[in-house]
Image: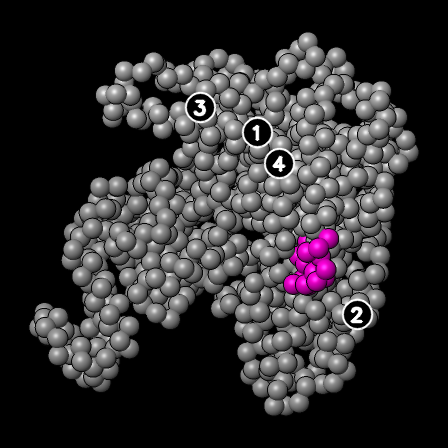
Amino acid sequence: MAFSYQRYFGVPTENVGHQLLYSLLRDPKVAKKVATVRQVKGSGFDLKWQETDDYKDWYRRLKPERRAAVDKLTDQKKVEAFCDGKKTSLPLVTFIANYLERPNKKGVVGRWRQKEGVCLNGLCVMDLDHVVKTHDGQAVRAYWQQIIAHLDLKEIGIVMAYISASGDGLKIVFKARLEWGNLIDNQHQMAQFLGVTVDEKCKDGSRGHFITTEDDILYIDEEELYTYENKAFAEKYDEQYRGGRTQPTLPAAGSDAVGGGRSDDSSQAVAGGSDQKNAEELSYHGIPVTEIIRKLLGGQEPQPGDRHEKMRGLANQLRYVCDNSPKKVLAALKTQQWVMDLIAEGDPVEATVEGACRLRYGWKKPEAVRQALEELGALSSPPESGGARGGLNAGQTCAGSDHPALTGTEDCSIKTQSPDSGGEMATLYDEWGQEIEALFDEYPCLREACVGLKRNGYPAALFSSAALFGTLMTRTWYYYYHRPEEERRLNYSIFIIGDPGSGKSFVGRLYKLIAAPIIYSDKVGNDAINKYKKDYKARGTSSKEQKKDALQQPNVIIRIHGTRTANGVFIEDMNKAVEMVGDKPMHLHMLTFDAELDSSTAAQKGGQWIDKSTMELKAFHNEEDNQQYKNVDSVNGPFDVYWNFIYTGTPLSLHRKVTERNFGSGLSTRLAVIELPDDEFEMMARHQATVNRAANERLKEWAFRLDKVSGLLPLDPLVDEIWEWTRDRLAIAKINDDKADKLLLKRVGYYGIGIAAPYILMRHWDEWQEKKTFTIDETDLGLCDLVLEIQYRCQHFFFGEYARHYYDNMDSDPTREKRHYQKTSIAYGMLPETFTREDVMRHYECIKGTADVIMSRLVKDNIVKRIDKGVYQKMRSSI
């Protein structure tokens, strides 16, 4: 089902396909009109436009009655009318509908753009007006990139986006979701998702949008745009729209909006009565919001002249204890009489709050907020409910679980995002760093690997250095409790994740030092290959060279491969990298280090690195892959994948690499994702440079030692420890009926071996040299336990929500998955903070039995808790 357009007002609509749309976008007349509109607006409706031939031609073509009306306008308004006339003469596209053939007022039959004949197709349009101040379109392009940065547009249903004819606005066409409500409901929901504000006028079924030029297209999904149809949406809403019923059918998205021009009551801010009482009970970690505000204000009430600025600053601070929720921030502010006075005086408090909550929301609390909470004891108070981030709720604390020791009653719903400075994970990284520091004197090179880092960065150093040392030990193997007959190798898939400027470059230092034996060996091979290529080229240009014996390609081993390695070269080198260890051939691991995770992710969509994602999956267990190409230079047949890789990147690059859509591939459970918390711009000690030189030499010395290690690693005590550790946590997962926890536990044990083994071998080096074995003691088991804990917590933190959504939706119709989740999310958001079964029945629109099942599930998932017979309380603001 295509959408429709009008060439100009007064003619019937026509269906639009690819060819017709692009003929409009490329029409020189359209381009000229769009350019004029933008130039006129950009000049501030300069009166000089009245002297142009374009203006005079427009005026001459006006009908007499219209010309008479224009004559009555001021000169400024005449230029505005000219600009508006140019814009309204553009073709008008109605993305959301086609129309039945009907007679117009004059009796002419056609597909007129009338609400009485609307046939919705399931598409929806968000009209974002005046998002920038300029009218050249470039600023809108930058604005678009900002709001959709790192989003999968196809996944969220966007099919087209383009810059408006005026050059200062944005049109976004997307698939409407039935569970979100009608067209304007969908706009509010998508606007909340993207963090923008919609034009409330765009709720009519006959609303059209002026076309612009091809250069203004920001995104287009050619597969879906012309053919998409949602019959269920049309069945539900066609008759309503034909009758003019276009008002919102659901509360504002998330029910957290304040103001916003909604015509219903659902988005109104907390006012008085019981709502005001709830506002006064708001707390964070048990500390009343009024105390937090008093501390932030230094105990002094703002003076009349600076109340608005104080209120705006306070709103920006309070959002860090209010889940960045406009409604909660406003409720907190309304506990202050001086803010209520501002509201009574007409100050735009609500708009200011909304503006504050649309600002960039960092995961670290501002220093003033952190200090105030610390002085009040709000950072050290034990939390009462789950979630990775603290938040503000009426009558309760909601700060995130500390997970002191996971049991069957605790919440494991760790979010896939970075911790704030006062959060659980930040505390854990500090604690893990202390434990690693305590082992500096036990394990060679552990101190040196951590040089230059703060203590909370030591876990990242442990994992990345161990992966490099373990890759050097590629000629070793061990046996594991799962399939004990198989020889296991030391395999690593390491991501070190941190914000820009957090110091991730330390991994590059470790790579240059620890991988030095492989780097030096590869240089010999690369030099030989480059000489061969140079000689081969000379054979084609020199008759003298052609008379020589045929060139033989050197048979060398090259193990390090970057993101610009062709698939054929990578596979050929991997197959050639074989050495005899004793009396058996062993494949040596390929190694990739890249300081930009984004570069490999982008390269997988095209270029040389394409399709290596399959090998990334198979590398962790050295599984078999297969290649069959006609290309005479390609290697054909099956091959096992031996490849360790280490990437550093930002949290956003990680979420582009592992998404909810591809979570089921298994990559996430193979990854060790360790965060490098921000260093808060602290300078390292001046003497650090001298320390580095000694540390560098020690790392390189041990690297060349481990590169010569081969044979069976005697790790049975370590395997026994891992078996018991995994058994205990699987028992907890079984009690919880938590398939997600079971999934994330699946490969944690392999990292207990892979990260601990290189350091254990170095610790027992003399014994290994003498006996080709070593004795694992309690210190070694403690290191293994620490690694297991780090990997397990980080798996839950980064991928816990993905795992739960995966199992929640696995048995449902995949085409209904997201719709089901959104409906329950909306219904949950509409529940009051404390609720009963009757509330669930009303908001979920379900019967008594279904409501009981829903409440039971919410309790089991630690989303709500029972506080009295038949009465429940939310533990999270949203699901």
Dot 1 falls on a residue whose secondary structure is helix
Report which quarter residue 628 is drawn in: top left
Between marks 4 and 2 in the image, the one whose residue lies nearer the viewer: 4
Q: Is 57 left or right of 26, judged from the image as shown?
A: left
Where does residue 350 sit, x and y in percent of width and height?
57, 73
Q: Alpha-carbon distance for marks 1 and 3?
A: 21 Å
Choose the circle earlier in sequence order: 2 or 1. Answer: 2
**Residue labelled with disc 4:** 516
Where does residue 513 sit, x and y in percent of width and height?
64, 41
Q: Is residue 471 above or below residue 680?
A: above
Residue contact at pointers 4 and 2, CB within 8 angstroms: no
Q: Nearer the viewer, residue 434 or 328?
A: 434
Between marks 2 and 1 in the image, the one whose residue lies nearer the viewer: 1
**Residue labelled with disc 1:** 521
Dot 3 falls on a residue whose secondary structure is helix
Q: Is 192 left or right of 708, judged from the image as shown?
A: left
Q: Mark 1 is on which residue type?
A: Ser
Crowding near the residue tagged with mark 1, few <14, some 14–19, many ≥20 C-alpha atoms within 10 Å? some
**Residue labelled with disc 2:** 288
Q: Is residue 602 above or below residue 391?
A: above
